[in-house]
Image (spheres, rainbow, N blue to C red):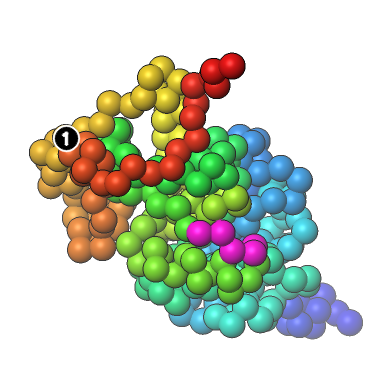
Amino acid sequence: MTRESASACQPTISITEKQHRRQICRIGRWMYTRGYVVANEGNLSVRLDEDRILVTPSGTCKGRLKSDGLLVTDLRGEVVSGTGSPSSEMLMHLLYYRSRPDVRAICHAHPPTATGFAAARRALEEPVLPEVIVGLGKIPLAPYGTPGTWELCAGLEPLVQNHDAILLENHGVVTCGRDLLAAYQRMETVEQFAKVMLTAELLGGPHLLQRADVRKLVAARPVGGPSLPRESFELPLSAEATRDRPAMARPALEPVAK
């Protein structure tokens, strides 16, 4: 077979798709080096067009991804290009793409502090950091579902429409964005917020912003900016609302009296 005929047998990859492949590999390395994933954990995907999704393969370390090892699937999760199986969390990615036309990329990882909150059944909804309020609003907790199944998606489905970042009970974090960099940066924001909240808890508890302060921050959010449109944005709890709601079961962080 000549070089020309061999090339003709290979699927054509557009310049844009090549860029997406390189970016998935780069962000996979970022997640791995920052400790958001270990071994073969986590997964990433980008929506290439209305019919195709570029996704990380199952059983592959995100710190060692190769551009030509990524898979292209259709909107049913069936592989149309590449060798191997797509991420075991493909159903979760499909849920986002089917529910949110604005979402073009998904990032799923297990950042340790945020995952600790998820394992403790603690959402990150308190109004503490202005940057988080402006960028993400609430970071809710989806109920546990077996990873890689529709059971997990059933718990996520009511939250996907209004949230760009969600904790997965006893599992990890999923974030989305209009591109992969935005989805990854939201993962960073969630983990940083979890670290700040844990530190604040150890120092006696976070100071919550008042309702008026939260409203000022939300009113200043840019329309069409890096976050959800205003109509899809769910306000975080204010200090007043937190005091008024029924007490939530929270694990004590103070030493247990003997």
Which quadrant holds residue 21? bottom right
Left or right: residue 193 compared with residue 35: left
In the depicted structure, whether residue 28 falls above or below residue 54 = above
Using the image, determine if residue 208 lies above or below residue 115.
above
Asked if the stretch drawn in magenta spans residue 104, the answer is no
Secondary structure beneath disc 1?
Answer: loop
Q: Position of residue 75 (x, y in %)?
A: 55, 80
Look at mark 1 in the image and give the residue it sits on: 210
Segment tinted magenta in the rendering: 143-147
Left-right relation of 199 to 90 = left
Q: Kindly identify the residue that appears in the image at 68 percent across and 58 percent down.
A: 67
Judged from this view, the residue extending furthest toward the right is: 1
Position of the C terminus by quadrant: top right
User: Can see residue 15?
Assistant: no
Residue 68 in which image quadrant = bottom right
Q: Amino acid at mark 1?
A: Gln
The majority secondary structure of the magenta stretch comes to loop
Give the residue displayed 69% in from the left and 51% down from the top: 41
Q: Position of residue 65 (x, y in %)?
A: 71, 52
**Is residue 146 covered in magenta?**
yes
225 or 11, which is in the foreground?
225
What residue is drawn where x is 50% and y is 26%? 253
Q: Quadrant of the N terminus?
A: bottom right
- The location of residue 245, given as percent across then percent down, is 26, 46
Q: From the viewer's perspective, tell me whether residue 69 is left or right of residue 207.
A: right
Position in image of residue 115 (x %, y %): 56, 43
Q: Is residue 78 visible?
A: yes
